[in-house]
Image: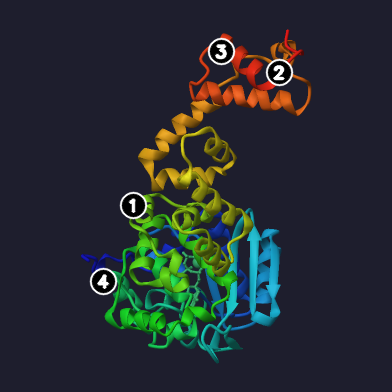
Amino acid sequence: MSRTANTLTRISPSALRRALDPVSRRLLDAAVQATEATGTLLWAVGGPVRDLALGRPVRDLDLATATDPAPLAEAIAARLGATVHTEPRFGTASVVIDGHRLDLAATRTEHYVRVAALPSVRLSATIEADLARRDFTVNAVALAVTGSGRGQVIDPFGGLDDLAAGRLRILHSVSYHDDPTRLWRAGRLAARLRLLPTSETVTAQALAIAFRYFDAVSPRRLWREFALAAAEPRPGAAFALLHAWGVLAATHPSLALTSEASRALAYRRGPLDPALVLAVLLAQRPDEERAAAIARLGAPRSAARAAEDAARVLAAAPDPDSLDTLTAATTDARLAALWLDPARQRDLQSALRRWERTRPHLTPVVLRALGVPLGPALGRALAELRRERYLANVRSAATARNHIRARFVSEGTSR
Ligand code: ATP
Ligand code: MG
């Protein structure tokens, strides 16, 4: 990796303002102004500081404060006419305006009692202690935006050096034990920012997988991570890393990438619908394995349906019975099958188009005139004529008439 520390953009409150979209900039300005009377300390933390350092656009603004964020959020909202949501129990608040959101959190320490347990939180910590509870060094950085220390960069773990060198590093060896979903976060971050895990991070990942830490994570949390990975700008790269590290197989063995699935996702641009990615991962699996993986991930009904339909589409043959299944499949399912099996799916798609264009040689009026009774028989006769025409067993209206007389008209009713 050729990045060096001095290729990072200078990190300062004014550089942060410039990197924000106009609405988020107004939110930041209002936050800074609202602290002037009270002297509240405020830091930009994690993602925004990291992305600013890389010269990437800063999308969402996370601020930490040493005090209760609720009154501050109210003051910001009052200035801008924005909406406030507060979670007093968690010491968090957010301000929303025009679809943009400012997140405020009281600095805190967290304590994990067992694998994947939600942490017990203690508020009123120093900013350094707050950074120490985070996932990777590149996210454990803060920039003071108010107070006498304004402009100070707090980087206790060497996150900016790691960022410059392209390294992904956990903060401590039991990080994945505390929260195994950080492995999924690692895959997203490494793919997005082209970071390489350090050797201690790789070892910790291998241990987390060997000791099956994922078993303790709820389906709801797993699906959230899965959907976030699908939404990455380079989802194929994220899933390839998660596969290579064994994270997919540890989440559920059937999620491991087949060579077709890996090719199917490579170079796709995100964000992708998680249902589509799930369909790509599971379409080639046997029914029971697919169902088990869907249950483990807590995938919603629509995503489960995409995976099931994709399996049916992959197994379909270009005959009328299969083609009807294909017509009923969701768009995600058809796309997943096409990505997994391009050549055959193109043949199948043209068969499908031909099937959709095929009309019976005879109309219902003609069938009635031939003596086919009204009711289900008429429908069956039309379906059979369509099918026989598609299969080229019946090639003209005259043959179609003979076919109907032979199969649908009893002696004496035929005219
Ligand atoms: P993105 O650009 O994906 O939003 P981000 O770094 O802002 O990246 P968020 O999910 O918004 O990521 O989280 C905000 C910050 O909270 C992170 O930068 C990180 O410091 C911390 N964080 C989030 N999830 C975890 C976790 N599971 N364990 C530890 N720290 C976390
Ligand atoms: Mg964020």
Q: Residue at x 66, y 15 (%)?
A: 405
- How far across and how far down the image is residue 318, in percent? 46, 35
Q: Secondary structure at mark 1?
A: helix
Q: CA distance from mark 2 to mark 1?
A: 54 Å
Q: Secondary structure at mark 3?
A: helix
Q: Which label is found at residue 345? A: none
Q: Which label is found at residue 399? A: 3
Image quarter of residue 400: top right
Classify residue 33 as left or right of residue 155: right
N-term mark: 3 or 4: 4
N-term mark: 4 or 2: 4
Q: Mark 4 belongs to which amino acid?
A: Ala
Q: How many marks?
A: 4
Q: Dot 1 corresponds to which residue?
A: 263
Q: Mark 2 belongs to which amino acid?
A: Val
Pointer 2: residues within 10 angstroms few (<14), some, or many (20+)? some
Q: Nearer the viewer, mark 4 or mark 2?
A: 2
130 above or below 375? below
316 above or below 168? above
- Asked if residue 267 shows in the view, the reply is yes
Pointer 3: residues within 10 angstroms few (<14), some, or many (20+)? few
* Front-most of residues 393 and 363: 393
Q: Secondary structure at mark 2?
A: loop
- How far across and how far down the image is residue 271, in percent? 47, 52
Q: Dot 2 corresponds to which residue?
A: 409
Q: Mark 3 belongs to which amino acid?
A: Thr
- Asked if residue 132 shows in the view, the reply is no
Q: Nearer the viewer, mark 2 or mark 1?
A: 2
N-term mark: 1 or 3: 1
